[in-house]
Amino acid sequence: MKRDPNSLIAVIAVLLVGILCQSSGAESPALAYMSEEFSDIPFSTITLVTTIPSLMMIPASLAYSAIRRKVSVRPLFIIAMFLLIGGGVYPAFSSTFAQVCMGRAVFGIGCGIMWPLAQSIIIELYNGTKQNTLLGFNSVITSVGGIIWANLGGVLALSGWRHSFLTYLVPVGVLVFCA
């Protein structure tokens, strides 16, 4: 049975992918708390926690086209989700700053795949005005997602910096909904 990409549930699922693209800011409110635990590390180094994902997104996004030629949308989406979730949550259970940075790097690779994937899904499924409308909504949802992630991470950081990384369990719900 072929699924209808124009159904409301399909459109919501396609747009939910976009909300994951700005998720890298959830830990920003926790940096001050993190610097207390890793007091032997300069704060300028602690801020790598926010920049490593962006740095890793660049090569992942550049490699996206080559990866996409070899891997179809569904497995690529699942791979990106596991990188996002695994790399996002891993720092909550890390004991060293290097482990936190490794998790952030994995997370960044997932974001680097997810960002172009969110737009290519729309381009592949829709045409004309519907495509343009959904690409516009995707931009809006991506931006709103950044606000949601930062606020959710901030609220969770109040109970400990590690808790802000539990924000990255939210994509599990997105994965289930999209399935």
Image: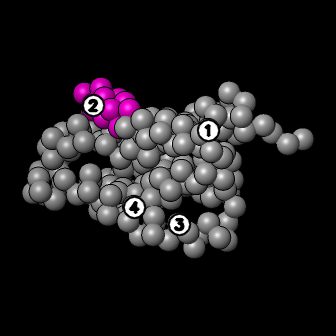
Amino acid marked by disc 2: Gly
Q: Position of residue 118 (x, y in %)?
A: 54, 49
Contact flag, marks 1 and 4 (Cβ < 8 Å): no
Query: For the residues marked 3 and 4, what is the alpha-carbon distance in whole angstroms?
Result: 10 Å
Q: Which residue is mark 3?
A: 64
SS type, badge 2: helix
Q: Nearer the viewer, mark 3 or mark 4?
A: 3
Dot 1 alpha-carbon crowd within 10 angstroms: few under 14, some 14 to 19, many 20 or more: some
Q: Which residues are magenta?
A: 144-159
Instruction: Give the amino acid type for the residue marked by disc 1 in the picture.
Output: Lys
Residue at numbered disc 1: 130
Checking the image for residue 57, the label placed there is 4
Label 2 – label 3 distance at C-alpha: 31 Å
Displayed quadrant of residue 29: top left
- Is 41 on the left-hand or right-hand side of 173? left
**Amino acid at circle 4:** Met
Total labels: the figure holds 4
Q: Residue at x 20, y 43 (%)?
A: 31
Residue 36 visible in the displayed image: yes
